[in-house]
Image (tube, grey):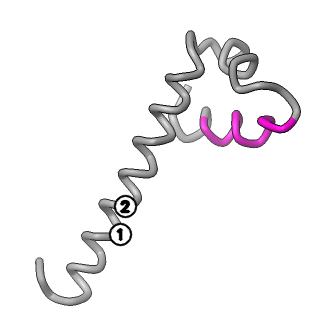
Amino acid sequence: MEKELFIKSVDSYKGVLSVTCLCHYFGVARSTDYCWTKKEDIEDIRIKMIQQLCKENKFIA
């Protein structure tokens, strides 16, 4: 399953079921894998925002 689809699916049902139950449903062994995956995406977004800001201010090409 794609990382983004997995995160969106778990986030959309998080209020109805626990993250652990949702992870088992999607075949992910532990809910910590969901947390790590989500954190990676947040870090990727931050890096892209920093790179975009640097490009806008002509710090990098």
* Residue ID at (35%, 69%): 49
* Residue ID at (33%, 63%): 48
Residue 12 percent across, percent down from the top left:
77, 42
Badge 2: how crowded within 10 Å, few (<14), some, or many (20+)?
few
What segment is highlighted magenta in the picture? 7-15
Q: Nearer the viewer, residue 14 or 26?
A: 14
Q: Which residue is mark 2?
A: 46
Q: Is residue 12 left or right of residue 45?
A: right
* Residue ID at (52%, 32%): 35
Provide the major secondary structure of the magenta segment: helix
Decide whether residue 14 is among the magenta residues: yes
Q: Which residue is mark 1?
A: 49
* Residue ID at (80%, 36%): 13
Instruction: Residue at the far right: name it.
Output: 16
Residue 7 percent across, percent down from the top left:
60, 38
- The residue type indicated by label 2 comes to Arg
Badge 1: how crowded within 10 Å, few (<14), some, or many (20+)?
few
> Are dots 2 and 1 in contact, CB under 8 Å?
yes
Residue 38 percent across, percent down from the top left:
51, 40
